[in-house]
Image (cartoon, grey):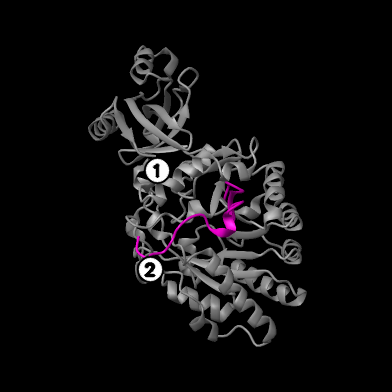
Amino acid sequence: MALKIAGRLFTGPFDPATFVVRGNQEAVVYAVVAKGGEAWDPHFRLIAVGAGEDGVTLTFADLPELASWQTLAAMPVSIYIHALGARAGAGPAERAALVEAIVAAVAPPDGIIPP
Amino acid sequence: MNAAAPVYGLRPEASVFPMMLVLSFVYPCNALCPHCPYTNSNIRKEYRDAPFMPPALFRKIADESGPHGAYLRISGGGEPMLHPQAVELLVHAKAVGAKIGLITNGSCFDEAKTRALLAANVDMIEFSVDASDPETYEVVRKGLDWDMLVATVRCMLALRREMGSTSRIVASGVNQKGVDVDAVERFWMEEIGVDYFIKRKFLTWGNSTELDASSSADPTPYLETDETPCPFIFERLNIDSRGNVMVCGYDISANTSMGNVWQESIADIWHGPGFRFYRERHLANRGKEISLCAGCPDWKYRSWTHNYWKVVRGAEATRVARSTVPSQPGPARLGEHDDFQAQTVNR
């Protein structure tokens, strides 16, 4: 499934309990998303957004924010990712800019992402 | 609603079972067409677990659809003829009474496959051509071979004549900038002699892709979404290679789930709470309260009258006429067939 957040396509959903972006993979901007509503009429809420680092493995289960995301969402959350690393000619500044743009456009933790 | 206003609702032919089931039969493709929603999204990657519709799933769909004579539209995220069992499965569907509308780029046929499909009288074989010359084709059908396409279509038309098959053979083109779609139509109707030419709107699939609507050569809508329900939820549904039923072809990312064909009957899903929800909202002119529909840029390009059923009728009329007149193709058909591009908003 794909979600477009602030004009960028994100891939997911991935379970934060098991999902890992390895250090040898493209660095990502990630969105923490809560999916509610009926299966036929889903509603997606952006709980948080963040970015990984080049060459550093990102293990979501180890992130201290995970528990607070789930508390904010009041339901299990999923991870969606948008690759934005060296292969795309991007670095930390581009990822930070995208995170900022998403926060401005969608306003987590209550922002709605249209399907 | 005044007396002259059209009445919308479940189409009579879809009162029990959908008239059309659009199947994501295959996700891999051998082309990189710039207007393709799958080339311009991450969906193919997401279906790496199910690149081809499993034969058991296809047979279940066909076996349920057959008694209703429903159309199986074989399309989806890639080239259908790349499915290792494509011919066998399509022939099975015909044998159990389903109708088949195959959409193909024409790159994977040989004479044996062509003969098998024609012998089964596959109802509609649509070649996505998009061009009338090799230079344009190289751009809009990147990765494919123009000469092979032309030879394949000519061969299919000749074999149909030889075999007396009733399969309709049509071509389609996306009306996008950089393509003279009228010239494409003339070439395929007059020079090649297909039964119909479908001019497709350039669609973006909104939040599922990175396609840019500015590539459209004709953004004229077919209907006003403020006053006209979307016709698709009253006639068809979409099924992916995992068996998930999506509400419509806009949701190619499968964010919706109306049910799963592995677990439920298609008729139950068709009359289930999900489709009821969409139909009730749309009939009450509240379709835009549904988040998926509110953001759908393609709703306005659907039509209650200017649609696939019109193509079927037009193609059949040409096929029958040509089967009785040996001299074909000919330019006379051009004036008779209906342009798939509405010139005015359908009110």
The reply, left or right, for residue B211 in relation to residue B129 is left
Of residues B232 and A82, the one nearer the viewer is B232
Query: Which numbered dot is residue B4?
Result: 2
Residue at (54, 53) in percent of width and height: B236
The reply, left or right, for residue B17 in relation to residue A88 is right
Residue at (54, 78) in percent of width and height: B189
| Image quadrant assignment for residue A66 | top left
**Gap between marks 2 and 1 measured at Cα:** 30 Å
Up/down of B210 relative to B196, above or below: above
Let me know if residue B206 appears in the view. Answer: yes
User: Which secondary structure is most common in the magenta stretch?
Assistant: loop
Query: For residue B28: magenta?
Result: yes
**Subunit ID for the residue under disc 1:** B
Of residues B117 and B32, the one nearer the viewer is B117
Quadrant in the picture for the C terminus of chain A = top left
Residue B190, percent across and down?
55, 81
**Residue type, numbered disc 2:** Ala
Of residues B63 and A85, the one nearer the viewer is B63
Residue B255, percent across and down?
46, 38
The reply, left or right, for residue B273 in relation to residue B324 is left
**Subunit ID for the residue under disc 2:** B
Highlighted magenta segment, given as a residue range? B1-29
- The answer to which of marks 2 and 1 sits earlier in the sequence is 2
Q: Residues within 10 Å of mark 2 (few under 14, many from 20)?
A: few
Read off the residue under disc 1.
B292
**Residue type, numbered disc 1:** Leu
